């Protein structure tokens, strides 16, 4: 099964990946969350970071000398990670191995790694693929996993009260993306209108480039939590990175990091 994220991170998208995101507040919160979670591991562990991307969490792993397998489908992203490999301890680089591969079919044996870390992949895939991928993680992980995923659940009366103002007004950090969203929505509306007119009068349809943001999937919070428990994983810690709300869809969309541990650990 293919999806946009599998083919998107090549060439300039890979070489500009960090630079385009580094000033984003969510980017910083993710780094802090991974640092917080990884710091709680008991001594040096083996970690599979998938997708490794440009390797932005490698500095967290170095702190406690964890050994790392970084897997990604894009060799261009791994090349970025290799180019910026600058560790405080020169000999640490021998503890990091990078491989090109797919999260759905990990080239690793059963229970061959202590922890799996997976940030910014699962919102590109359908709920079925998410299930397959987390199933793979649970096959290879001896101790647990760290998962970042944007969920959704219906709004309750309390959520309206809690997020009311945030739903209509952008926060300080979201002001730029809020304006982007408004402008994109207007442009999309104009383009749809134009296509309708062209179709009506000239009987032609023009296929424009797809907006990559439409590739995002929001996972049902209930389903994801029950998947963790079906796989015998306990949620030991959850960190809220960012919340979006939608009055129109009556949905709350929290972006959460979970530390999951294999039961009885
Ligand atoms: C948004 S980036 C996230 C990278 C990194 N985890 C981070 O947080 O910066 C998504 C990455 O997923 C990789 N990717 C997409 N589909 C994949 C798959 N099926 N298996 C492994 N990597 C995949 C892409 O090549 C890209 O590097």
Image: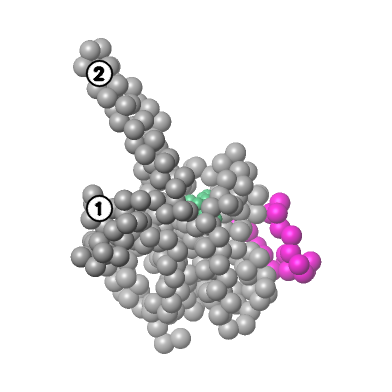
Query: Do the residues bearing badges 1 and 2 touch, measured as CB atoms within 8 Å?
Result: no
Q: Is residue 53 in view from this perspective?
A: yes
Q: Position of residue 178 (x, y in %)?
A: 40, 45
Left or right: 186 as drawn, with respect to 12: left
| Residue span colored magenta | 82-99
Residue 36 covered by magenta stretch = no
Name the residue that disc number 2 marks.
Answer: 197
SS for tag 2? Answer: helix
Q: Residue at x 39, y 77 (%)?
A: 235
Left or right of 254: which side holds 43? right
Q: Is residue 92 magenta?
A: yes
Q: Which mark is residue 247?
A: 1
In percent of the image, x 74 and y 60: which residue is there? Answer: 86
Q: Residue at x 65, y 49 (%)?
A: 79
Residue 61: image x %, image y %? 63, 70
Could one spot residue 108 in this view of the protein?
Answer: no
């Amino acid at each position: 099964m293919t999806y946009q994220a599998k083919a998107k991170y090549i060439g300039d998208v890979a070489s500009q990946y960090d630079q385009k995101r580094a000033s984003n507040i969510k980017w910083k919160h993710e780094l802090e969350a991974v640092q917080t979670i990884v710091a709680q591991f008991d001594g040096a562990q083996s970690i599979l970071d998938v997708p490794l991307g440009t390797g932005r969490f490698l500095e967290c792993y170095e702190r406690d000398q964890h050994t790392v397998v970084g897997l990604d489908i894009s060799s261009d992203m791994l090349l970025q990670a290799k180019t910026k490999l600058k560790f405080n301890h020169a000999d640490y680089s021998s503890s990091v191995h990078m491989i090109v591969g797919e999260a759905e079919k990990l080239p690793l044996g059963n229970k061959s790694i202590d922890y799996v870390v997976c940030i910014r992949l699962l919102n590109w895939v359908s709920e079925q693929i998410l299930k397959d991928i987390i199933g793979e993680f649970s096959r290879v992980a001896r101790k647990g996993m760290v998962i970042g995923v944007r969920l959704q659940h219906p709004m309750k009366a309390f959520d309206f009260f809690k997020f009311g103002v945030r739903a209509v007004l952008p926060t300080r950090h979201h002001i730029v993306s809020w304006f982007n969203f408004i402008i994109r929505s207007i442009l999309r509306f104009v383009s749809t209108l134009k296509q309708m007119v062209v179709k009506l009068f000239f009987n032609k349809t023009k296929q424009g480039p797809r907006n990559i943001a439409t590739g995002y999937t929001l996972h049902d919070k209930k389903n994801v939590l029950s998947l963790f428990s079906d796989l015998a994983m306990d949620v030991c810690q959850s960190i809220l990175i960012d919340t979006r709300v939608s009055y129109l869809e009556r949905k709350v969309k929290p972006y959460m990091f979970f530390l999951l541990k294999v039961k009885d650990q």
